Image (cartoon, rainbow, N blue to C red):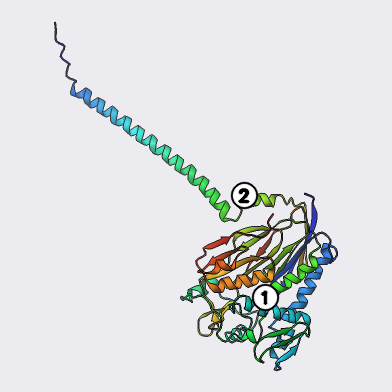
């Protein structure tokens, strides 16, 4: 019976394996970074869109209320002392309150 | 929902912008007639209630040296409302601060304005306002039947926001049969109508004019009181504005720059808005049982949900 002693792996092949392993890890890291950066960019873009929408006072829920107004005709007559507007609508026009 | 024509008109009045929106016919006629009537009445009241004209009915009353003065029924109604505001707020909303206000330099609608930001930076101390110890408003007595006002000569009444709230409510009485209406007396609003249609009411920021919140109301009163406008630089280099602390007779810097209040009527909303601002951040919300928006010095704001009828 012959003993089969494992052949020692040559140093140059070990080095090659380490190089390939390191290269694979680099690729994985780069891929992870790209996926994370992409996800962050998409999130920021969506968040910014919603933020700008809300900050400008155009809450979509409230807009739905406005949308029902369905303004068909608006005519404005401006005199020196007063501005008169006539509009056809199913919902009364909005009004604004501020310090007088 | 059917489409209808709404007529709206805006015009300069009370040193501000007033307006009316009317949809559907009512006791005042068609919408165009109704808004025209609103404008006529407001301009007439402006002439009678302005304190910047020595010949106005209010100025004549304030300058009268007699203790008891005969006034028109509508002036008696205003004085009753103004004194009622003081009783309702324990003297915090005090209509007898006209002379201290004039002494501070507020004698005309054209006073050089000071920006809100600068006014706040020039005034580092913040403190809640308090009623005046003297409480001159307790000496003002109105007899609606005889149409007289009795008060110690020298006690002068300021029409201010109380008159605007009252005017909006009185005009609402005339428009009540319309499908939908809104009366705007320089920011004091009264909404209503028999059709029960909701209307957006937008609350504007005193800092940058953006819309802070939008209510959708079918009926009720909305009023905004603040120090964002009508501020000026005094001769002592200090910032002044028209909302005085009754206890000191000096402009009130409480940490709140504007309050919008909702109430069943515009007069009540005006009283609540003023009282909330003068109370300061710690107790402002208790004056807003029907909703409102409180805006602080730094631009932050709180919204109190409306309990009024909404769309």
User: What residue is drawn where x is 26% and y is 29%?
Assistant: A19
- Please give the residue where the numbered disc 2 appears in the rendered image: A60
How many labels, in total?
A: 2
Q: Is disc 2 on the same chain as disc 1?
A: no
Is the residue marked by circle 1 packed among few (<14), some (14-19), or many (20+) residues within 10 Å?
A: many
> Residue B99 sits in which quadrant?
bottom right
Residue B283 placement (x, y as % from top left):
53, 69
Residue B12: give its label.
none
Subunit under mark 1: B
Foreground residue, B169 or A51? B169
Chain containing mark 2: A
Position of residue B276 relative to residue B154, above or below, is above
Q: Nearer the viewer, residue B111 or B56?
A: B56
Q: Which residue, given by chain and number where applicable, does mark 1 sit on? A: B162
Image x and y of residue A59, in percent: 60, 52
Assign a secondary structure to mark 2.
Answer: helix
Q: Callout 2: few (<14), some (14-19), or many (20+) C-alpha neighbours within 10 Å?
A: few
- Label 1 sits on a secondary structure element that is helix
């Amino acid at each position: 019976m012959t003993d089969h002693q494992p052949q020692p792996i040559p140093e140059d092949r070990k080095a090659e394996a380490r190089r390939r392993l390191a290269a694979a890890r680099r690729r994985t890291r780069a891929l992870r970074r790209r996926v994370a950066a992409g996800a962050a960019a998409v999130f920021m873009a969506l968040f910014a869109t919603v933020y700008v929408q809300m900050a400008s006072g155009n809450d979509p829920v409230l807009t739905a209320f406005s949308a029902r107004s369905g303004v068909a005709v608006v005519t404005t007559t401006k005199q020196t002392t007063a501005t008169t507007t006539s509009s056809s609508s199913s919902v009364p026009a909005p009004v604004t309150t501020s310090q007088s | 929902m059917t489409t209808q024509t709404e007529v709206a008109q805006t015009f300069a009045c009370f040193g501000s912008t007033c307006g009316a929106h009317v949809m559907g016919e009512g006791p005042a006629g068609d919408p165009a007639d109704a808004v025209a009537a609103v404008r006529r009445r407001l301009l007439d009241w402006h002439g009678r209630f302005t304190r910047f004209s020595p010949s106005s009915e209010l100025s004549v009353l304030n300058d009268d040296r007699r203790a008891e003065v005969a006034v028109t029924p509508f002036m008696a109604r205003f004085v009753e409302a103004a004194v009622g505001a003081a009783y309702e707020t324990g003297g915090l909303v005090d209509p007898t601060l006209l002379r201290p206000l004039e002494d501070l330099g507020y004698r005309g609608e054209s006073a050089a304005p000071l920006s809100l930001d600068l006014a706040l930076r020039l005034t580092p101390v913040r403190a809640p306002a308090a009623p005046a110890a003297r409480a001159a408003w307790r000496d003002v007595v109105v007899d609606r039947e005889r149409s007289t006002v009795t008060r110690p000569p020298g006690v002068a009444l300021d029409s201010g926001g109380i008159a605007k709230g009252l005017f909006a409510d009185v005009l609402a009485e005339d428009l009540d049969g319309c499908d939908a209406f809104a009366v705007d007396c320089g920011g004091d609003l009264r909404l209503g109508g028999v059709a029960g249609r909701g209307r957006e009411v937008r609350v504007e920021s005193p800092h940058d004019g953006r819309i802070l919140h939008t209510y959708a109301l079918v009926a009720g009163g909305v009023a905004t009181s603040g120090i964002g406008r009508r501020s000026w630089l005094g001769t002592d280099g200090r910032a002044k504005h028209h909302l005085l602390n009754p206890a000191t007779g000096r402009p009130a810097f409480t940490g709140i720059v504007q309050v919008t209040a909702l109430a069943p009527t515009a007069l009540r909303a005006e009283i609540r808005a003023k009282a909330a601002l003068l109370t300061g951040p710690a107790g402002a919300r208790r004056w807003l049982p029907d909703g409102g928006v409180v805006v602080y010095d730094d631009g932050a704001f709180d919204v109190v949900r409306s309990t009024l009828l909404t769309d």
